[in-house]
Each structure stands twice: as C-alpha cells, then as structure tokens.
Amino acid sequence: MPKPKVFVTRIIRDKGLDLVKEFCEAEIWLGDLPPSREILIEKVRGMDGLLCLLTDRIDAAVLDAAGLGLKVVSNHAVGFDNIIVAEATARGIPVGNTPGILTDATADFAFALLMAAARRVTEAERYLRAGKWQTWGPSTLLGVDMVGKTLGLVGFGRIGRAVAKRASGFDMRVIFFDPSSPAAPELNASPFASLDELLRESDFVSLHTPLTAETRHMVNADFLSKMKPTAILVNTSRGGVLDQDALYEALKANRIFGAALDVTDPEPLPLDCPLLTLENCIIAPHIASASTYSRDMMALLAAQNLIAGLKGERLPHCVNPEVYKAR
Ligand code: GLV
C-alpha cells in the first residue's frame, strides 16, 4: 500500500519527524525560513496531510490548493490563530494542536519575563556592557518587589493556572479574569468578574488568552490607563492581543512601570519598532515553549495528530471536534 503523502512545513524535532517519515511519504521544507505562500500553495497540492507551524497561514486558498484528498491539518503549536479553522471545518478536515506539554515551559518563561521586568535584568545587563557600571550604588537600578504583590491573570486556562502555581512560591496574591473558568481554590486564585477591577488591583498583569476577534487589541490605551503606574505587563499569548502603539505611549510616559513580551505583531518585530528604543520594555523572539522537552513533545503530538487524521481516526488533540459529528 502506498504511504500517505504529507507536506511538513519545517524541520521539526526528530521525535516527531521520525514518526512522520516512518508512516508517510513526507516532503519536508528544509529552509530555515517558512515556505512562502506561493510555495506552500504549490507544495500542498494533492497532499493527504499537512503538518504546519504557527508561521504558516492556513486559509481557504491553501485548503483549496490541497484539494479534496486532504484529511488532516496538524499544527505544531497550542495556539491556532494561524489557521482559519472554520474553513477546515467547512471542508470536514480535522485540525490538531499540541496542548498540555508546553504548559510548564511557557509558564516558566512568563514568570522569567515577569521577574526580569521587575528586577530590570536586561536593562542592567545593557548598562554593564555599555561600561556604565562605576560602582555599587545604593539606589542603582532599583526594581519592583514581588512578595505580597498581586498578580492578575487575564485568561485562566492551563498556562494561566501554571503561572498561578509559580506565583504562590513568591507569596503573591493571585486574581484572574476569565468568564469561562471556574474558581480554583486549590491554587489560591480568586476570580474577578470585572477586568477593570482586576487591572486596578494588579501589580503584575499577565496575558493568557488566545487571539480571537474578541481579544484582538484587548490591551489598548484604555486597558493600560486602568493599570497601576507601578504595574508590569507580561504577554506570552499572541502579539495581536496588544496594541503596540498604545503600549509604546504608556511605557514612554511611564504610565506603567514596564512590559515584557514574548510575542509581537508582526513577528519578527522590525528593528525600527519604537518599543525597541525603550529601557522599560523587554522583548523576546517568541520562545516561551522553547525547552527541549517541550519542543520534542510538540513535534511528537503534531506527528500523532497527523497520523491519526491520515488513518481516519479521531485526532488526540482536535480543535474542531464538530467535524466528527457530521460523519
Ligand atoms: C506557541 O506560541 C504555541 O502556540 O504553541
């Protein structure tokens, strides 16, 4: 029996790639950069499966180019805003993602960013490398204390909860805003019915919400104006959740103490982005899930979703399970 044909849009970790190669006739894009849209559309033609990354936009044109034989789209990410899921659903194609296994790595990194912004780690290192360090100073590079402070989580899914656990080790008070999530007494985290109230009370605000039409630019001038002037904003969700122009204005005017972003819009962030001129803004290149275990497991889960879809089985992690109802 011929093996199913799949297009894999980048070299993923061997733990997943080996499985894909064993089960499929795989065409793997070997470039360091994602395939261009034209190449993606050309390569996907006639494929039975597509394993893509968050850097690939999968929409009607890509799905149409693949044709009626496409059985599955497997995204190597927990977020799936790069895929127009409704278009896949309309074609009866299950879409897979990789939840769970990157929760700890992402929460660790959110906390690392939070601490780095509070204690001005990257700014201090720039100061040292620039030869500005003359002597130990009682008031040099003073940061924000964490113990006893309030952490406000916007979104209280797996990653938000894992951040709450880390905060308890710092004796922080944790509050969250997530209308779809119940209280979590075991995590000592209190739900807030109003986002405004959460912003008014929080010393740190960390974003853990997916990017949807409702959350796009949720962090705007109005949101930032409700934060404390001493507060720090952390974003490890998606860049589009935040209006970067509004953030620049707020940081520049010291309307909040600082921000730390793992995600931006666009990615990569152009080097002339004004945010990069600010000392009180840390920006990382979307690496929150970049630990060896997490990326190995993301590759494995993406391969398992792909293969299940090719076999006509239910994907272990499917974001549009309604496709199965229609069958
Ligand atoms: C990373 O951002 C992911 O969604 O997995």
Image (cartoon, rainbow, N blue to C red):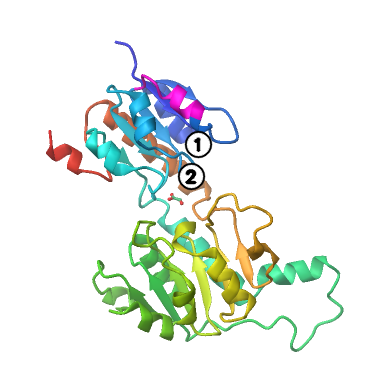
* Rendered residue at 40%/70% (across/down): 165
User: Does 41 lie within the magenta span?
Assistant: yes
User: Does 143 lie within the magenta span?
Assistant: no
Q: Position of residue 249 (x, y in %)?
A: 59, 73
Q: Which mark is residue 13?
A: 1
**Mark 2 Cα shell of 10 Å, populated few (<14), some (14-19), many (≥20):** many
Give whichever of 151, 325 is nearer the camera: 325
Asked if disc 1 and disc 2 are in contact, CB closer than 8 Å, the reply is: yes
Looking at the image, can residue 128 be seen? Answer: yes
| Residue that carries the numbered disc 2 in the rendered image | 295
Task: Identify the element where label 1 is drawn.
Answer: loop
Residue 219 lies, with reference to residue 285, above or below; the image says: below
* Rendered residue at 30%/70% (across/down): 178
The magenta-colored residue range is 38-47
* Rendered residue at 43%/23% (across/down): 21
Question: Which amino acid type corresponds to the residue marked 1 in the rendered image?
Answer: Arg
Work out whether mark 1 precedes mark 2 in sequence or the reverse, and give the earlier one: 1
Question: Which amino acid type corresponds to the residue marked 2 in the rendered image?
Answer: Arg
Give whichever of 149, 203 is nearer the camera: 203
Magenta span: chief secondary structure: helix
Task: Identify the element where label 2 is drawn.
Answer: helix
Q: Position of residue 263 (x, y in %)?
A: 52, 57
